[in-house]
Image (cartoon, helix red, strand yellow):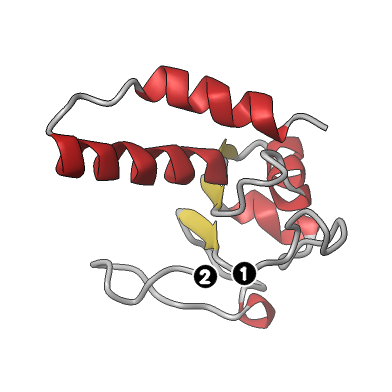
């Protein structure tokens, strides 16, 4: 779930989360993505051990994983944030312009509405 290249991070299989304590969970699996069902890679009862939960999936903006995490008191970050940040950085690098990140975020969220 977390890149092993980040200092002090480790990749952990969901089966190994029982009885552990972590600061942040980052889901990089496709589970929960639109068209793949309303699934989560982590059982809801395990989410309370995390301070922060991020799902890189941006469609839907609030996945089952994020909904379950909010219900257990976790701070969350939607994949929309990564999607917008990647696009903004590309625009900055290609054009040298300061990207309108808030407009980009609003546009993405508007386009993702059912």
- Identity of the residue drawn at 73% across and 57% down: 33
Count residues near mark 1 (Cα–Cα under 10 Å), then give few for <14, some for 14-19, many for 20+. Answer: few
Q: How far from the left and from the top, in percent, is residue 86?
A: 36, 46
- Left or right: where does residue 96 sit relative to residue 87? left
6 over 77 or under it: above or below: below
Which residue is rendered at x = 17% and y = 27% of the image? 97
Residue at the image position 75 percent from the left and 41 percent from the top: 67
Whole-percent x and y of residue 72? Answer: 72, 41
Q: Are marks 2 and 1 in contact (CB under 8 Å)?
A: yes
SS class, disc 2: loop
* Residue nearer the viewer, 45 or 38: 38
Q: In the rendered image, which quarter contains the C terminus?
A: top right
Please tell me whether mark 2 or mark 1 is closer to you in this view.
1
Q: CA distance from mark 2 to mark 1?
A: 8 Å
* Quarter of the figure with residue 71: top right
Residue 10 location (% of width, % of height)? 39, 75
Q: Is residue 27 above or below residue 12?
A: above
- Earlier sequence position, callout 2 versus callout 1: 2
Which residue is drawn at the image coordinates 78% and 49% (left, top)?
64
Q: Which residue of the protein is positioned furthest toward the front in this rendering?
A: 95
Q: Which residue is mark 2?
A: 1
Q: Which residue is mark 1?
A: 29
């Amino acid at each position: 779930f977390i890149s092993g290249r980040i200092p002090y991070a480790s990749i952990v299989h969901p089966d190994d989360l029982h009885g552990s304590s972590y600061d942040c969970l980052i889901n990089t699996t496709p589970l929960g993505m639109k068209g793949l069902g309303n699934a989560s890679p982590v059982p809801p009862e395990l989410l309370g051990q995390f301070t922060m939960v991020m799902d890189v999936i941006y469609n839907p903006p609030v996945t089952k994983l994020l909904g379950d995490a909010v219900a257990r008191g976790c701070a969350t970050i939607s994949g929309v944030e990564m999607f917008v940040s990647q696009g903004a950085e590309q625009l900055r690098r290609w054009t040298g312009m300061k990207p309108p990140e808030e407009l980009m975020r609003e546009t993405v969220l508007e386009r993702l509405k059912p």
